[in-house]
């Protein structure tokens, strides 16, 4: 709560949160639309995330406070090269999707995307990703999801009339049922 009050009461280019004992840091860069996480342990590692919504900074800090670097594993599309964030959202999404080479990892990523923005439709026949989101929202994750749907052989269906243009509808599948239940 103290960090939330601190963060919302200031305007800065960069906020750095450091866990010196764990040798980990989180860097929030609101003006650049970037979050970076850094681990300086035995195998140094840094990853970067493009943030398209301002309301993503505080949850990232809370996850870092709770579980450090690993607490952000499922927070979004992390890239090891900061320059990758300059690519179009569609290119970033395709690059991220290409990193999933096993069915298990791809299903887990689809579950993460669903947990962030999805619902089960009232008929229980479809998983709806990007519920009530416009087609211009979450473009990188949408591009990633579409490639993962194809990779997994999931059945994508047309959204019903009246659905928001950015929604992605997928017929239920036993693999998704298990994974989405885990994320619920």
Image (cartoon, rainbow, N blue to C red):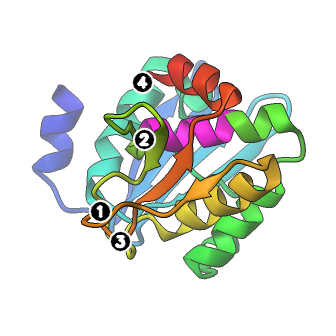
Question: What is the spatial separation of the Cα atoms under label 3 and label 4, in whole angstroms?
Answer: 36 Å
In this rendering, position of residue 25 left or right of residue 161: right
Which tag, 2 or 4, sits closer to the chain's start? 4
Mark nearer the N terminus (2 vs 3): 2
For the C terminus, give its image quadrant.
top left
Residue beneath disc 1: 163
Q: Residue at left 66%, top 40%? A: 109
Mark 2: which secondary structure? Answer: helix
Quadrant of the image containing the N terminus: top left
For the point 54% across and 27% down, the residue is: 180
Highlighted range, magenta? 108-115
173 in relation to 87, above or below: above
| Label 1 crowd bin: few (<14), some (14–19), many (20+), radius 10 Å | some
Q: Are marks 1 and 3 in contact (CB under 8 Å)?
A: yes
Which residue is disc 3 drawn over? 165
Tell me: residue 50, above or below residue 60.
Answer: below
N-term mark: 3 or 4? 4
Query: What's the distance in space between the residues labelled 1 and 2, CA to CA?
Result: 18 Å
Classify mark 4: helix, strand or loop. Answer: helix
């Amino acid at each position: 709560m103290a960090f939330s009050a601190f963060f919302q009461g200031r305007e800065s280019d960069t906020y750095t949160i450091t866990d010196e004992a764990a040798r980990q840091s989180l860097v929030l860069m609101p003006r650049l639309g970037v979050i970076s996480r850094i681990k300086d342990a035995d195998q140094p590692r840094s990853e970067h995330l493009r943030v398209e919504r301002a309301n993503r900074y505080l949850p990232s800090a809370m996850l870092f406070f709770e579980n450090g670097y690993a607490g952000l594993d499922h927070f979004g599309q992390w890239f090891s090269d900061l320059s990758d964030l300059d690519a179009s959202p569609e290119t970033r999404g395709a690059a991220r999707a290409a990193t999933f080479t096993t069915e298990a990892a791809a299903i887990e990523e689809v579950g993460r995307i669903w947990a962030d923005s999805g619902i089960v439709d009232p008929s229980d026949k479809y998983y709806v990703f990007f519920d009530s989101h416009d087609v211009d929202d979450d473009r990188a994750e949408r591009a990633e999801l579409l490639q993962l749907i194809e990779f997994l052989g999931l059945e994508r269906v047309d959204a019903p009339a009246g659905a928001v243009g950015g929604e992605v509808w997928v017929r239920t599948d036993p693999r998704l049922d298990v994974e989405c239940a885990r994320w619920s």
